Amino acid sequence: MSATENSTNTVSQYSQYLPDDKQLQKNIARRNRQAIIWKYVFLFSIVLAMFSLFMLFFSIIRQAFTYVTIYDQVNPATLSDKPLENLSQQELGDVIENHYGAIRTGRNDIRTLVFNNVLGLSLSDQEKIADRERAKETVTVREVFEDKDKKYPAELADQSVIRLDVVGYAALIEQNFDQEQLYDFVIKNVVQPLIVNSWTLDEYFFSRDKVNQDIADTEARLREDKKDPTIELTEPKFHSWVQWHLITKTIDLSRPEDAGLRTAIIGSLWMITLTILIALPLGVGAAIYLEEYSSGGWLARIIQTNIDNLAGVPSIIYGILGLALFVRALEKITSGDIFGLGVGGNTATGRTILSASLTMGLLILPVIIINAQEAIRAVPDSLRQASYGLGATKWQTVWNHVLPNAMPGILTGTILAISRAFGETAVLVVVGSITRITVDPSGPFSRFTVLPLQIFALITQPQAQFRNVAAAGILLLLTILLSLNAVAVILRSRFSKRAV
Amino acid sequence: MANQQVVAADQAPVAARPADEQINLKKRIRPFEVLIQGFLFFSGAVSIITSIAIVVVLGKEALLFFSTPTWHELRDQNNSLVSLATDIETDATTLKIPAGTEVKIPLNGKIRLDNEMMRVTAFEGDTITVERGLEDSPQVAHKAGAIIEEEGDKVSVVEFLTGTKWQPHVGEFGVLALVSATLTISLIAMAVALPLGVGAAVYLSEYASESVRNKLKPILEVLAGVPTVVYGYFALTFVTPILQGLLGKETLGIYNMLSAGLVMGIMILPTVASMSEDALRAVPRALREAAFGLGSTKLETSTRIVLPAGISGIVAAFILGISRAVGETMIVAIAAGARPYFTFNPFEAAETMTGHIVRISTGDLSYGTIDYDSLFAIGLTLFLMTLVLNIVSRQVATWLREEYD
Amino acid sequence: MTNPNGTSKYALEARNLHIFYSSFRAVRNVTMQIEPNKITALIGPSGCGKSTLLRSFNRMNDLVLGSHAEGEILYRGQNLYGNNVDPVEVRRRIGMVFQKPNPFPKSIFDNIAYGPRILGQRNKKILGEIVERSLRQAALWDDVKDNLKKSGLALSGGQQQRLCIARTLAVEPEIILMDEPCSALDPIATLRIEELMRELKENYTIIIVTHNMQQAARVSDYTAFMLMGNERAGELIEYDQTERIFTKPNDSRTEDYITGRFG
Ligand SMILES: Nc1ncnc2c1ncn2[C@@H]1O[C@H](COP(=O)(O)OP(=O)(O)OP(=O)(O)O)[C@@H](O)[C@H]1O
Ligand SMILES: [Mg+2]
């Protein structure tokens, strides 16, 4: 580099104060090296964050789709000499008649199956039938089956629908199901396969030997437990824990593969709806008050500081507040007692959807207020002046001009608040929703559970397969939340375009 | 032509207003407006009511906690539990304890069997004479082998704040046992979130182009929007096994503070990153230009000029991050274990304040027990800790604003 | 104009220089030579590319995403826009003072010591000497010598600008670029900076952008007049000794501008 070589004779002003040129040249090389290294260090931070997110999703997916071994509680070979899927409708019916109850308790179980799967009777309808029978009235097969437009063998027509034997119920099932449905029924209720062990995707792909060893161990242990050396596990296979029954069935803490989250989902929906009904008007109202009505005096300042502080209070504190205030102090109201609406069956306590929603409402209030304030502030003043200029009152101005223009922003904030409430767990643990509940909530005064809480309960179950159910539940939860966020992002981008 | 006529016709009535018409310009009360204003004011006040309610509820119940006597199991000279030697009937007034046990029971002191409270009126050898069913507690028969508890002192505020043992069954309520875990986990979390968060912020604000930043930030937001129960799952089923693989199962149990802390760090990272990035971007461009103009490299500009200039925002992010960590619940409830021991060893399982609140509230908690009341005392401690952290964080953040406006 | 051994008698030399912001050409085909130890003023109406040209002289434009240059800027025989030229090194040798004073939010001492420190000077005593010398050169020493620990932001606007000049001097550049250094200052502070520039030209080459005709006439030895040409690209209209430009310019557009009939 010619410049460097020449610099010593041409530049006289360079003093002894700075390192000499050679040194500087060396320094600069080192500094540039450092600059590059650190650039990658900074990049690494953000890459690591992205990687964590990826790993987070991976950790769930690997548990939601697993490699499983299944133990058929009744060996299909003992049911028929042909493979089950080749049996005719008639033969499958016989299998049910002859073998149903080998494991299950028998009549009561198959009756429930007929009522639920064949007739699709609601719980209250079943209750009604039982009541009439208790009153010595005979509810006939004809009555119930004709009512539901289902087929039944003539010889059973006049018998009581709840007093048939296994053979009778088996006949009813056989008449109303096609071959495929019957086959499914036999597998589920006669063969009763049980998932005895499961391995995550990565275990399957990267530690095959261990998996094989595990399978052998499982089989040996099972033989020992059941004192039956002939037991054989069926061919291991992949199993998706994300299944339709996740949203149609209720929780079953004895059989992971049948556990559904319906009660929790309905509970979440009830709670969110009620929460929004409570928090949205209050939140937007507070924002309007602060932005449009208050004159920025000490009161408004206190409210504002207060809101900022509330936004930082840990959610579990709200849970404690809800427990003391809504669940206990206002028990009469939140349990529905004073309205005479307490849901029967569940001993009336304040641990209801209403209590949870009130608590959750307080929790998300700051989020809604802060977002609504921003949205309202973004509405140009010229609009207000135009409205006042036409002789509108304050509220008319707010209602007709400010609110419609701030609406997208308010909605975005609300959606963000909803997604916060949807995933919130700690509050509800303390407010005390119950996790073993299988009765769908039917109103604000019902006891309930919500999705994240049910997931928490599943995680803490001792049986490992419930972790797989939890993973499936988490996928469901994340799907809901990501969709909500996507809507918020779209809204926000449309909003910002309009504001330009 | 036709149009003009229509316009003219419309104008006629206005033009026809008499000059001497009475116009009322007096203030008018509009009931609807007043009502609305009332509702709006109420909405604003709800937040204040909430704050007051939090303070009152926590304070009141915590007071109750400090004024309720504790109960602990009766122990003999060998420090083993003392239990009932024979069954007693619903209205019997003497209890037998195993022969030869030496215990100290103060006369007139209270003892408890199952949930029934009794007053000791006499005590001789292995026979205790009692007055049954005190304070409306259910007077029932008790089986031999039932553990006898005796009433102890109330928990003093000092004991609560300085005690390092949390053992409700022997009447020990030292919140430091829980605070130690809270602090350990929070520190681990911040050790992850601070360097990575600030590093990510520097990258986003100083290095990344606009389009890269616009792609990366939403991903960070996703990370921030994942429910904490999912992070807990991640810690328990993924991070812990990996750590166990690295450190050995003897060193690290299934439940440990390390895994909970690391994952909590990941959870807080987006908050720290985005607040720090805001702080860095608020640093005026002119400062960067000055630094570059003097021949600084990008690194020197970022770390020697921009970072120090944005330091108050970063400190604010740091403090807010700690406050989040202290209040975070589900991760620790799932992954850190249920052992309320005073320890700072990250390889051990330990229960935080929030974790303890979750555990006692998932059990069947009956109102009015000291366990129930302790929940509020812990809650109050937690509330005050986070409140102070939040206020400090906000104060630090305002310093930044004052500097450049 | 280049000596056989690669050095030039000019401090800087632009040859057929075009500067772009992405696809927009902000400066077209500028060729000019900057005399060493003189003050050169760039004048012209707003938006004609003065700052752009000035900032290309130490590659500050690199910081604007999508900016690039065609042509050459020769500095001691080397093209500043050539491959392998490190802008970090360039900027140390060709320092810059900005329109708005921009001291770092640090103490006065640290503001000035920053440059020497990044260049590797750790010695406390020498740093102290550098600070004193730079502050004296910038005529700020007497104002601040008793509280060097004070924040640079606590000074008045004029003092802040002199602090920024001192900060630039501390890394011992050869050339100092000044982009409207007085536009944020009151007349008295402006006069002091002008005085300072005249003192500094003994040792430094100074290029200054200014909107203030009197200032250009007062302090500069050479003046370059720029104007927006086709497609809003800035062009160099006339470049000569200041005296000539202000007394008998060659181009009528120059005359229009300096007599205030234009822009
Ligand atoms: N960062 C940038 N990105 C894109 N275009 C720019 C940028 N900076 C300046 N320009 C454009 O380049 C042209 C020249 O700008 P420049 O700032 O050099 O003008 P100027 O002569 O310094 O004006 P002024 O006297 O107002 O400072 C203008 O048209 C301007 O819009
Ligand atoms: Mg300019």
Image (cartoon, rainbow, N blue to C red):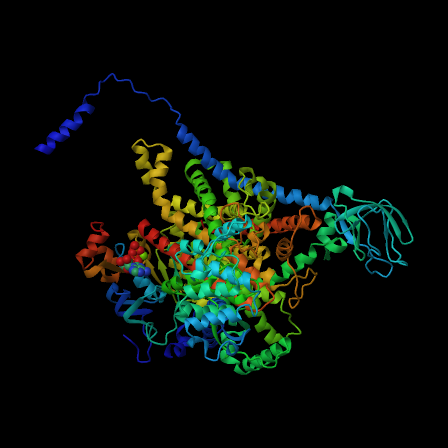
Check the picture and name the quadrant holding the N terminus of chain B: top left
Residue B78 position within the rendered picture, expressed as x and y whole percent measured from the top left: 86, 61
| Left or right placement of residue A174 versus residue B260 in this view | left
Residue B182 position within the rendered picture, expressed as x and y whole percent measured from the top left: 63, 58
The single residue placed furthest to the right in the displayed view is: B125
Q: B301 above or below A19?
A: above
Quarter of the rendered image showing ligand 2: bottom left
The single residue placed furthest to the left in the displayed view is: B1
Q: Nearer the viewer, residue A35 or C147?
A: A35
Q: Residue at left 28%, top 17%?
A: B22
Q: Looking at the rendering, which quadrant does residue B207 occupy? A: bottom left
Q: Residue at left 52%, top 71%?
A: A98
Residue C69 position within the rendered picture, expressed as x and y whole percent measured from the top left: 29, 69
Residue C214 position within the rendered picture, expressed as x and y whole percent measured from the top left: 30, 51
Q: Can residue C126 be seen in this view?
A: no
Q: Is residue B178 visible?
A: yes
| Left or right placement of residue A270 versus residue B116 in this view | left
Q: Residue at left 43%, top 75%?
A: A87
| Left or right placement of residue A267 versus residue A1 in this view | right
Q: Nearer the viewer, residue C103 or A163?
A: A163
Q: Nearer the viewer, residue C95 or C254?
A: C95
